[in-house]
Structure formats: structure tokens, C-alpha cells
Image (spheres, helix red, strand yellow):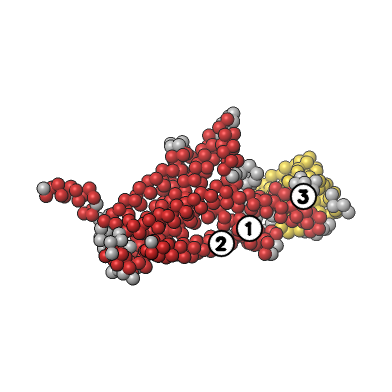
Amino acid sequence: MILFFYILREVLPQFFSSLLILASVLIISQLARLTELLVAFGVSLENFFLPLVYIVLPFIPFNIPIAFLFAVMLAFGRFSADGEYAGLLACGYPLRRAAVPVALLAVVFCVSGVVAGAYLEPWGRRELVRFIFDKTKNEVDNMVRVKIQPGVFTDNFLGYTFYAEGISTDRTRMTNIMLAPPAGSRQAFTILAPRGSITGTADTGDLKMSLEGGEGFSQSGEKLSGSVLKFRRAEFDLLRLFREQLIDAAVGDEDYRSFAPADLTAYIAKLRNAEPRDDAQLVRARYLFHNRIASPFSVFFFGMFGMVIGVVDPRAQKNRAYVNGIAAIIVGYVFMMGFKWFADRGWIDAILAAWMPHVITFCAGAFLLYQKDRLPPSEPVLQRSNLPWNLKFNSGTRD
């Protein structure tokens, strides 16, 4: 039991350190997205930390297996470098016994990953959308009620340049309006209208701007040609225009990726019974449901593989374990995306596409661990002469 808890004490700090590093890398990769939110809503602790939490949470199920791989690799790499692994072997404590505490941690992290994938991931997506929707209401309402002024060109009005010669005191009616893309934009479409109005409110979510009796002018800079479009009435959903600058237009209340397990199950049943049935959307929803459960099982493969690459000959290159670990992450991701690609094209069922990569990699990890356990630390596990079937073949030949 002493060795059991000793291994746990070595792996756990490495796991949380690796998880923190991965979260930091994720935060850095999302700085551009956070900057857009800060520019849109203003710089404040709330506008920075809340979106940050909502963005990081959906990645927890993917970060847990990767952090576990590096934690096990670093722990067993230290055992090997300090000669402790050789001492364990001399005391009759083989690698398969050292795998018991690693397997226990893998079970705990697998359950944590399933819970995070089933509940925290959709919760983070929902809360981010809700945060943007709520902030959008306040920002657009402030923009319409305060920012735009009569006779003043307003830059960055929902991504456009806005001008109104006259605005009524209640700010619901406008005259001589121009709506144009910002300078340097690839779009060359300008709208002019003699009259316009703003109806609805941001609180009720129906804030709209209507232009009447206007014309739209478009011009192609390459061909030096343009076109004119006359209209009686043009209506713009101001809240929707602002939201689409910050999040995908398809994201919203009907985004199945933000559904909890019960809602996602009901959504799948709805798609299955719909007429006509959207088979492509049904496959994506079924794959997401099962992948949230199956993906955390990769911790078992990464745990076993971390032990294999961690235990090395002290004379070998020190950075080889890191290279092998990164290669395993890349191969595992490509493997998973490949099965998803097959499911999207209807070549295999969505359930098989979600589970097969992890079943195959688990078997591969178990085989590598078996090889590492029965061979000396300096022997390559995949060398042809060390493969079990090759040994049996050679033995039979000698007999």
C-alpha cells in the first residue's frame, strides 16, 4: 500500500499542473475572441472572467486525458531516471502492479470527464450565449438611445457607419439616413433612405430598425461596375446583427451542442420522427451524444501509454517521451476525426464512430503495457524480435 499511495502522490500533482498549463494555453488561444467581447461590451472584470470561464469549460473533457498522459509520463519518467523503477523491479513490483493506482485514477478522471462532457460543456455553451445575449440588449439599447446623434456620423454601428440628419426626441423616427460599410471593408454596399423608424425594445428582444422608400448602391472595385436596388421597406433586426458579430449565427436556443443529456435525447427523438427527416443533423446529434460519453475513455489509453513512454532507458534521449506523447495526442485526434468523417458520410453508424477509436486505442495501450511489463526497460516494445507472435514463431522454428 505504501507504493500504491506513493505513485498516487507523484501522479496527482503532475496532473493538476498539466491541467493548469493546458487551460493557460487555451486561454491564450482564445484571447482574440475575448478581445472582441471586450471591445463590444467594454473592459471590466465581469466581461473578461465570465466569458473566459464559459469558453474554458467545454474543453475540460478533452484536457483531462491529455493532462493525465503527461502526468503519468512525468511521474514514471522520474521513477526511471532516479533508478526507482529498477528498484521496484528488483523488489518484485512489476509494471502491471504499478498500473493499479494509475487505473484507479483513470476511472476517477473518466467519470469526471463524462460528467463534464454531459453537463459542464453544454452549460458553458449556454451561459456564453446567454451572457452575450444579455450584454447585447444593454449595448444595443445604449447605442440606439444615446450613441447615435442627429447630423453625426457614427462609426461601428453594428459593424457599419450610420448617419441620420434628423432624429425625433423620442428617438423612434429618423430622416435622411445613410448606412454604409466601414472604410476598408470588402463590402461596397450603401443604403440611403429618406425615412426610418426604430420599433420595439431591447428588453423584449424585438428591437428593429425600418427604412422606407430607399435605395441600395453596390459597387465592385475590380470591375468598376455597380447596381442600384430600390425598396419600399427594409427591416433590420438590430439585436441579431450585433450578436452575429460575436457568435456564429447558428448558435442560439436551437444549438444542439448546448443541450444537456435529457434535452439532447429529446432532440434526437424529434429529428428521428420529423418529416422530412434531416439525416445529416441526426447523425451529428447522435454522434455528439455518444462522443460525450465515449471520449473520456481515452484516459485509459493515455494512462497506459504514459507509463510505457515514461519508463525508458536512462541512456536514451530525454525528450523522446515528450515527442511520443505529442504524437499520440495528434494520432488519437486524427483517428477520432476520421471515424467522425465516416459517420458524417453515412459509412458507419454514429455510435460506432464515437466508440470505436477509443476501443481500438485501449486495446493498443493494453498491448503496449503488456510488452513493457514483460521486457527489460531498455528493450523497444515494438521491435520485431520482441513481438509475442514472433517469439513463438522463432521458438517453434528452433524446435
Could you tell me residue 216's position as x and y percent? 73, 46
Specify whether 336 is left or right of 247.
left
Tell me which residue sits at (29%, 57%) in the image: 373
Could you tell me residue 270's position as x and y percent? 59, 34
Disc 1 to disc 2, C-alpha distance: 11 Å
Specify whether 42 is left or right of 307.
right
Give residue 159's quadrant in the image: bottom right
- Residue lying furthest left in this view? 399
Q: What element carries label 3?
A: loop
- Residue tagged 2: 27
- Residue tagged 3: 202
Q: Is mark 1 on a helix, strand or loop?
A: helix
- Residue tagged 1: 51
Q: Can residue 366 be seen in this view?
A: yes
**In the rendered view of the protein, which quadrant contains the N terminus?**
bottom left
What amino acid is at disc 2?
A: Ile
Q: Do the residues labelled 1 and 2 touch (CB within 8 Å)?
A: no
Q: Which residue is at the front of the view, 79 or 278?
A: 79
| Mark in the foreground, 1 or 3 | 1
